[in-house]
Image: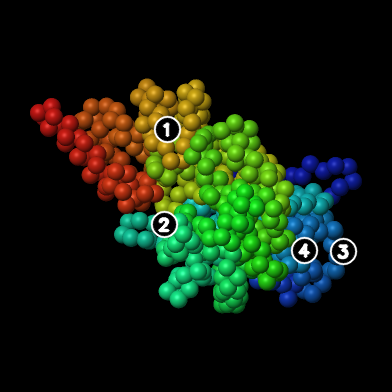
Amino acid sequence: MRWCVAVPLVILAQLAPGLQAFRFDRGEEPPAIWIHPECEPVVKYAASELAFHLKESLAQECSIRQSDLLEVAELRIAGDAVRLTAPELQTAVDSYTLQIRPDSISVYAASGNERGVLYGVYALLEDDFRCRWYTPELTVIPEVEHLEIAEGVRQYAPPVQWREVFYYEAAEPVFAGRQRLNGNTSGRCERSPGRRVIDEGAHGDWGLWCHSMFSLLDPELYQTHPEYFAEVDGKRVAPKPDGTQACMTDPAVADIVIEALRKKIAATPPPSVPWAGPLRYWSVSQMDGRGYCTCSRCAAVDRENGSPIGSILQLVNRVAEAFPDYRIGTLAYDYSRHVPGATRLQPNVVIQLCSIEAPRVAANEPVSTSPKHQSFRDDIVNWGRLCNDIVLWDYVVQFQNLVAPYPNWNVLQDNIRFYAGHHVTGIFCQGNRDRGGEFAELRAYLLSKLLWDPDCDLERHRQDFLAAWYGAAAPCIAEYLARQERELAKSGLPLSMDGEVAAHRNGFLSEVNLRVYNELFDQAEAAVAADPERLNRVRKERLGIQYVQLRLRYGTPEERRKVLADFTACAEKNGVWMLSEVDWREDQAGNRAMFFKRISDELDAEDNEHGR
């Protein structure tokens, strides 16, 4: 972990007439941090996080004390503990209330929502102490000489109640907690030598995540009860991990699933992360692929509903009735995406809606207005009429070319605002599970900010990150990103999450544009030539245009051999192994070694062709 301590700050409150302020002064006797003796572990963690940051910021050791004069879900900064009257509290998930008085600061959350105390502490540190957590490797804690915080009450309730940014760069629980990503409980691991990935399996607040049916209905049952599994073309099909489903309307299947889920709930502890909450979501959902059941019962229910979601919901509703204290999720995905015409949902059913078709069609056009997204937009609106609890699976990366330029920046905020305004209470942003990728640190940071506050000043956050991460190179990097967006818009070509760089050879990835991008990176490298860490960060982002140069064969073979050598050395230095999610396909050249061989073979073939 790298700590960067900025120039000492003096921050004085702009006080309205008659108001006072709570004051922090460096070098003076610090206040104590108070918590209730019976508070939840997450409140104790909030106290330790506050004490750590105050020590770094004020050079003061703030003791953590206990008093039953506080509310159980309260943290207080004060000299002494006295009984105080709490303001009216927010009750939404992860909401908090800050009450600043001249002699104390209290952070409150409603009972059962104690994580809100932690998030209120982070709001205080970020908004008032100007702490920044840019990546797991870069935290900025300014030294504060004097700080005044005006008295008053501040409250916030995040409209997106469940938030996960699925990027390797966000997969560190301490960092994720500070960014208020309550879904990011996974850490990191080394999948194979040189390949660092998200240690998948845990999603905060979820006991079962998705494609879960065969973890509740044992596929081995097919040997004795083939009727439990899908009938396709008149035959019961043996289950396999993808491409087959269960028979959702068989009464015995529902009984088996309910009992299996009961056992899983009893046997599954929450993640061992200080801020992790109870496992309130359990997904009972279709497997990946198609192969859904067309037996007479399932077909009749699906005809009535105009969609195969009908038979799925018949099962899911039964499960939800058996577990009224949990949120039972199910996928609306691929063949099951459309809203049912007749079946209604139990109140604790959560729809896990997937946006996969939208970024395939035009990832750079907003879901809220683009004619290309009319079908998906209709599904969101229609599901919102049936369900107040939609968890949306959003795709924010180009899977085939993970390091290539992907200028979808213009739609990130618009899309999340639209989702939050249509009963989407949870968002899973699927990025890159592997280390590296195009502007992965920046993307993880901005998406974290958007999930917490869809109406945030995103441009301010972007400029703030660029200045901290790239230093003097930030203006060149900002211009590089802006030019890509301008050139993509000028071309009129759609961006696709499954697209190839060749599709934009005559657009934003033209040879002329690549020359301009290289000039900007030359300037960026020169600006931080004396700063090795930031120079390496700039060179890592240059991998994107080097990748395009090599894929589209821009330049002479000699020039491209040098580019390939630079690309390979920089990727190795930064632990960038995966270049495509589909690393098992030779035609994708999906990892660093495969890519090096593919480009080297191309260059050798060119040399042979020209007798070199």
Gap in angstroms between the C-alphas marked 3 and 4: 14 Å
CB contact under 8 Å: marks 3 and 2: no
In x, y percent, where is residue 164?
A: 57, 54
CB contact under 8 Å: marks 3 and 4: no
* Eye-nearest disc, 3 or 4: 4
Three-letter code, disc 3: Thr
Three-letter code, disc 2: Val
Work out whether residue 70 can be spotted: yes
* Eye-nearest disc, 3 or 2: 2
In front of the other: 575 or 410: 410
Locate residue 210 relative to residue 514 in the image: left or right: right
Q: Quadrant of residue 252?
A: bottom right
Gap in angstroms between the C-alphas marked 1 and 3: 54 Å
In front of the other: 280 or 44: 280
Which residue does the numbered mark 4 point to in the structure image? Answer: 110
- Few, some or many residues within 10 Å of mark 4 (<14, 14–19, 20+): many
Mark seen at residue 337: none
* Eye-nearest disc, 2 or 1: 2
- Few, some or many residues within 10 Å of mark 3 (<14, 14–19, 20+): few
In x, y percent, where is residue 2?
A: 48, 54
Which residue does the numbered mark 3 point to in the structure image? Answer: 85
